[in-house]
Image: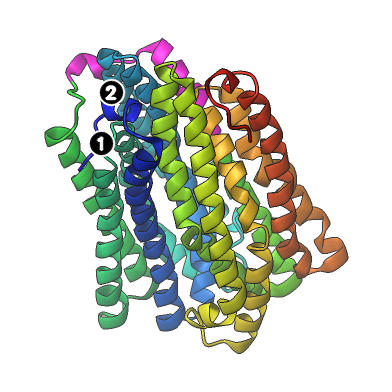
Amino acid sequence: MAVSAQELGSQSIKKLLVKQAVPASVGILFLSLNILIDTIFVGQWIGSLAIAAVTVVLPITFLISSLGMAIGVGGGSVLSRALGAKNKEKAEHVFGNQIMMTLVLSLFFMFACMFFSTDILFLFGAKGSIMELAKAFFAPLIFSVPFLALCMMGNNIIRAEGKAKFAMVAMIIPAFFNIALDILFIKILGLGMFGAAMATTISYVMCFLFVLWFFVFKSELTLKAPHFKWNLPIVKEITGLSFVTFARQSVISILAIIVNHTLYSYGGESAITVYGIVSRMLMFALFPILGITQGFIPIAGYNYGADNFKRVNESILVSIKYAALLATVIYLFILFFASEIVSVFTHDLQVNDDTTVALRWVFAASPVIAIQLIGAAYFQAAGKARKALLLTLSKQGFFLIPLVIILPNFFGIFGVWVAFPIADVCSTLLTAYFLKKEMNTKLIQTHDGIL
């Protein structure tokens, strides 16, 4: 059963979190499985160097398409609070402006990447023998960006309406098509990197068609022509909160540039392959925690908009508790089965050994990240853009990038891997400080639990 917007303010928090987080987790699982299996296929059927090429290209396409995610998350916060305040007209204006913003920006950057593809690929780390494979993958994939951006934006609005299961299906569809088409284009037809890119592009188009179907036939929002006209106050409100998510994605892309160049300097193409596997596992293994975070946002946003701070407080505590427990289980699994996990991607023994070490260190602080993720998500759901921006950027921007630049000078490639858990701990401590302060002031009157 889908959750109506009104139920976000009435059902028990635990039940709501399960209803919202489980479909979100399953959707993220399939989205990450899509990328994970894509990496496995290119590694097994094309070669380990193809993993390095995918590692270079994907941050570029996701940076552009993350405009849609950013507009979706930021606008979703505005939309959730509008629905909580029973202002459906504003919610529909928000959605119409989100569509226009996403379409205009994604098309602009798509054409920019088409004209400057070689320079952009080099910037993101396509050096040596990686470049030609990266070009073959990038050229068809860039056409999928507007579709992916609209899917990411629409998916967040579907969740903001409380329709988490439809959002889950939207993320399952591209995974299904991409895996099937990978087998056809790479394994059967032998199209190599071009085939991998075409499979991904078609899968995003299919996702877009489903999202379009949802908003035409299933959405509570009924859009009319006036809703697509630019509304400056709404655009400013969306932009203020969207900037948080886009800034985070931008910092992640800057991190990818720095890590790729650093690893190439210390270990060549194979070191970038190692990072490719590790980064895919980061996306895949943490899917339940990310699902809880996604499920938490509409609950917190709706109740904050309705001035029901007791439920906001409870949603924070319950979400952190569940996410921390799951993160601990995930880390233990990684710790004991790292070698077996890595062997699925490649038969290169040196890459396997190096990746096993890297994987264990990168995930070392996973049990504490729940506080950082939920804390940053709370400030975004509450419309507090500055604190949300600060906390969202804290891991990659304030801690991880400087550590990746500094530590390899003393510890070589190992310095890159150990930078990840140190950054996790530092950003968690920072988030815990601000979240505890918020709960002791804004939300304390409504709940006895203190972080």
Residue range highlighted in magenta:
224-246
Q: Quadrant of the N terminus?
A: top left
Q: CA distance from mark 2 to mark 1?
A: 22 Å
Majority secondary structure in the magenta region: helix
Secondary-structure class at tag 1: loop
Q: Position of residue 371 (x, y in %)?
A: 61, 43
Visual colour scheme: rainbow
For image coordinates 43% across by 26% down, the residue present is 301
For label 2, the residue is 96
Of mark 2 and mark 1, the one earlier in the sequence is 1
For label 1, the residue is 3
Left or right side of 174 for 325: right
Left or right side of 405 for 209: left
Closer to us: mark 2 or mark 1? 1
Q: Position of residue 378 (x, y in %)?
A: 53, 31
Q: Please say if 187 is above or below 147.
A: below
Amino acid found under the numbered disc labelled 2? Gly
Judging depth in this view, the residue of 115 and 20 nearest the camera is: 20
Left or right side of 323 for 154: left
Amino acid found under the numbered disc labelled 1? Val
The quadrant where residue 86 appears: top left
For image coordinates 17% across by 23% down, the residue present is 222
Q: Is residue 270 magenta?
A: no
Secondary-structure class at tag 2: helix
Judging depth in this view, the residue of 220 and 296 nearest the camera is: 296
Q: Is residue 230 magenta?
A: yes
Left or right side of 243 for 224: left
